[in-house]
């Protein structure tokens, strides 16, 4: 158990007050399920007569929410979040707090929670349906490195990425979708 920090001026134990949690007083306009899009371009289907597998393109909606800034954020996350959130905001003339406020108003989640949840969901899909290495999954999902991926899975699920992959994967999952 961590000990509270000691105040260097007064010597007493100083405890940080937890920040009050933000809550929307109405239903959020969008849930993650409505906004999330699998990272795959094609899905496998079997021909009923010959039994041969064929891949068909997955149709994509260019705008999922109708809110341009949120759609740009989703496209950025779909691309593996190249760069940092600060760079994303700077290119669009936003502050980090502005983007976080927009995401909070529309989804009920903080900007950071939304980004992490989205990236973890993408990593789960990549690990379940592909044979990508952990380094490839981490890079493609925007989490960054295998170390970050491992830490994220430990924090979120109390499992390693490999254990989570075994937990998610079912018979016939590998190859069900293609990038």
Image (tube, rainbow, N blue to C red):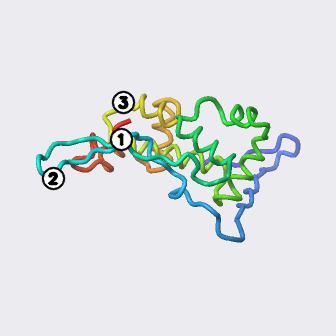
Disc nearest the viewer among 1 and 2: 2
The residue where tag 3 is placed is 133
Classify residue 29 by image quadrant: bottom right
The answer to which of marks 1 and 3 sits earlier in the sequence is 1
Q: Quadrant of the C terminus?
A: top left
Q: Secondary structure at mark 1?
A: strand
Q: Position of residue 150 (x, y in %)?
A: 45, 37
Left or right of 15, for residue 49? left
What is the CA distance from the residue labelled 1 to the residue labelled 3? 20 Å
The residue where tag 1 is placed is 42
Q: Position of residue 55 (x, y in %)?
A: 29, 41
- Residue lying farthest to the left in this orientation: 50
- Residue lying farthest to the right in this orientation: 9
Disc nearest the viewer among 2 and 3: 2
Disc 3 packing (10 Å; few <14; some 14–19; many ≥20) = few
Q: Secondary structure at mark 2?
A: loop
């Amino acid at each position: 158990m961590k000990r509270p920090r000691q105040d260097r001026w007064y010597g007493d134990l100083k405890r940080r007050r937890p920040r009050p949690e933000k809550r929307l007083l109405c239903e959020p306009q969008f849930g993650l399920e409505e906004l999330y899009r699998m990272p795959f371009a094609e899905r496998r289907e079997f021909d009923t007569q010959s039994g041969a597998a064929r891949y068909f393109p997955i149709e994509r909606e260019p705008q999922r929410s109708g809110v341009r800034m949120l759609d740009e954020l989703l496209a950025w996350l779909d691309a593996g979040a190249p760069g940092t959130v600060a760079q994303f905001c700077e290119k669009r003339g936003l502050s980090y707090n502005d983007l976080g406020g927009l995401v909070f108003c529309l989804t009920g989640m903080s900007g950071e929670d939304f980004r992490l949840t989205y990236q973890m969901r993408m990593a789960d899909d990549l690990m379940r349906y592909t044979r990508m290495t952990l380094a490839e999954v981490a890079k493609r999902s925007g989490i960054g490195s295998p170390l970050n991926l491992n830490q994220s899975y430990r924090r979120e699920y109390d499992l390693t990425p490999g254990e989570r992959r075994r937990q998610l994967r079912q018979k016939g999952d590998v190859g069900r979708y293609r990038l």
